[in-house]
Image (cartoon, coloured by chain):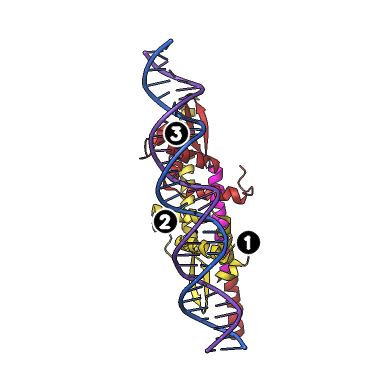
Chain colours: A yellow, B red, C purple, D blue
Amino acid sequence: MVVDAELSDTEVDRLFQALADATRRDIVTRVIEREQSVSELAEHYAMSFAAVQKHVAVLERASLVGKVRRGREQIVHGDPITLRRATALLESYERLWHQRIASIDELLAEDESSTG
Amino acid sequence: MVVDAELSDTEVDRLFQALADATRRDIVTRVIEREQSVSELAEHYAMSFAAVQKHVAVLERASLVGKVRRGREQIVHGDPITLRRATALLESYERLWHQRIASIDELLAEDESSTG
DNA sequence: CTAACATACAACCAAATGGTTGTAGATGCT
DNA sequence: AGCATCTACAACCATTTGGTTGTATGTTAG
């Protein structure tokens, strides 16, 4: 399962952009729990079917979900790999932070040994 | 360090929205590594100072960074707590996924014991 | 074959976004 | 005091976004 492939700036833009909407995040949780058709998803929201269709399209462009035709329905499923990549990205920022804290601590330790 | 406080939909919207721009992500990494003034940040980008100012404002509204006045400068620093919350959120989606996989595995195991 | 259903997609609209320039207010240096 | 620097903020503009309605197309059930 390839997870560490570098994401381009544009891909990351799309990824976070896709996550920056409550309806879309809700769709993601729903299809993670159980893959389901677009119209089935649409039932839960106070907006037109076309609007939900667009949200799914945004998630698809971000590779957070995929669609597979089943008869006349289009079944939406979650993409765990992209989710993993998004998390990994944020974790790398956190790692940066911890590294910075660590080097500050080092400096403080040196300081103490020279002043104490 | 409070990390698990529930974020409202709007807050999460702002959070991911703020991360959905390469310039802003770059600003975040820079201020995580070392806090610095807005104009210092602005030097690195091929856009106006005002544009960078706006990006910082977006990050601030999302609580990804904070600003502190120092003389005539405004020093921007990263906010690790918000970063942690963002990561935690994505991790919870991943957890959902693993739970789903686990229950599928259970079903398969039951199936095998009845058919084998 | 026909009716109902699920989807696709275009056209349209208001609001938000990401950029610009210009002006004005604080602060620091000499 | 006077000038340069850093920031704030308004006004403006093009593009994107998130929604709508309407129409067309493919698919399944009777």
- What amino acid type is highlighted by mark number 1? Ala
Residue D21 relative to residue B72: left or right: right
Say if B36 sits above or below C14 in the image. Answer: above
Q: Residue at x 40, y 54 (%)?
A: A10
Nearer to us in this view, C2 or B16: C2
Report, in whole angstroms, how far the alpha carbon at label 3 lies from the one at label 2.
Answer: 27 Å
Decide: few, some or many residues near mark 1? Use Cα within 10 Å; few <14, some 14-19, many ≥20.
Answer: few
Mark number, residue A46: 1
User: Mark 2 = which residue?
Assistant: A11
On the same chain: label 2 and label 1?
A: yes
Residue D19, percent from left and from top? 56, 59
- What amino acid type is highlighted by mark number 3? Val
Q: Which residues are magenta?
A: B78-101
Nearer to us in this view, D8 or B43: D8
Residue B16, percent from left and from top? 52, 50
Report, in whole angstroms, how far the alpha carbon at label 2 lies from the one at label 1.
Answer: 29 Å
Report, in whole angstroms, how far the alpha carbon at label 1 lies from the one at label 3.
Answer: 42 Å
The verdict on residue A23 being magenta is no
SS class of the residue under badge 1? loop
SS class of the residue under badge 2? helix
Q: Chain of mark 2?
A: A
Q: Quadrant of the C terminus of chain B?
A: bottom right
Q: Quadrant of the N terminus of chain B?
A: top right
Q: Residue at x 48, y 31 (%)?
A: B75
User: Mark 3 = which residue?
Assistant: B38
Residue A67, percent from left and from top? 49, 70
On the same chain: label 1 and label 3?
A: no
Q: Residue at x 57, y 50 (%)?
A: B12
Q: Chain of mark 3?
A: B
User: Quick one: label 2 or label 1, which is nearer the N terminus?
Assistant: 2
